[in-house]
Image: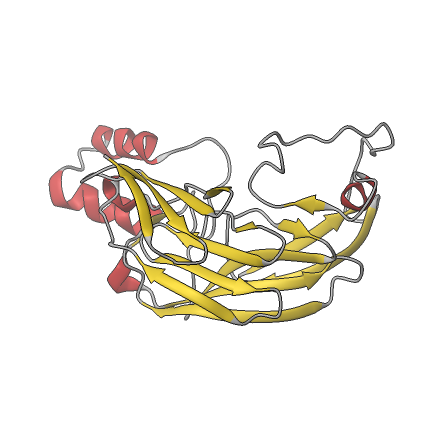
Amino acid sequence: MTRALAIIFAISIAFASDPEWPSFRGPSSNPAVVNSNLPEKWSKSENVEWTADIPGLGWSSPIVSGKSVFLTTVITDGKAKRPQTGVDYSNDYIAELEKQGVKGKDLMDRLNERDFELPNEVSLHYWLYSVDLNSGKINWKREFYAGHPPGGRHRKNSFCSETPITDGKRVYVYIANLGLFAYDFDGQKVWSTPLENFPTILDFGTASSPAQSGDLVIIVNDNEKQQFIAAFDKNRQASVAHES
């Protein structure tokens, strides 16, 4: 399974100086920039400067700092379940099976077979990529975790749906059931902090992207056991705030 990353012309003209898109939804947490010259149409060839094929699957958004694009992806050993398109969700499938008289364990087995990848079913490789903004050339890639995932995912989710953040010096990767990982722009790991795996409903998976304020990386963990907000010092890598 391949995810093709296309950095469109809009990114390079949306900023007067070096482009900065440091986190999910941009520098102001608002997915918009003020620029009257932005194109209104895109296709596989129109208003596209370059494309880069990135193996694996990830719902995380690319971020930009200076001349670098950063993104995460997960590669599955063997086949991964294809992403589900459209608006059909598991509840619709459950209703359909119930109309057919399928109940109990048989219903759950068929639901899991179609919609879910559970931890004991897959072996994964989690990657952070740095891509050159001007050319699409891969600067470096770093594997920050390998093995069975702590939790599962629905096929409308991925194993790395959280978007990284950057402060212009480091990239901070948050995977809610794995932990936090900090890399410098040369691809050297600065620190990592493991986090407990909390159960999510029906193993739908995680998705909450981190934020930053000054020297703090701030995360939200929404789960079925203990929901919380936590802040981590970028330099000391220690949790300094917690609210349940």
> Does residue 64 appear to the left or right of 171 in the view shown?
right
Whether residue 114 is visible here, answered yes or no, is no
Asked which quadrant contains residue 76, the reply is bottom left
Q: Residue at x 39, y 43 (%)?
A: 219
Q: How many marks?
A: 0
Q: Residue at x 50, y 53 (%)?
A: 58
Q: Position of residue 53 (x, y in %)?
A: 66, 62
Query: Relative to 226, is 194 above or below?
Result: below
Tell which of 122 and 52 is nearer to you.
Answer: 52
Q: Residue at x 60, y 58 (%)?
A: 169
> Does residue 88 appear to the left or right of 59 in the view shown?
left
Tell which of 28 and 120 is nearer to you.
Answer: 28
> Does residue 28 appear to the left or right of 206 in the view shown?
right
Query: Relative to 163, is 121 above or below?
Result: below
Q: Position of residue 111 (x, y in %)?
A: 27, 44
Q: Position of residue 69 (x, y in %)?
A: 66, 56
Q: Quadrant of the C terminus?
A: top left
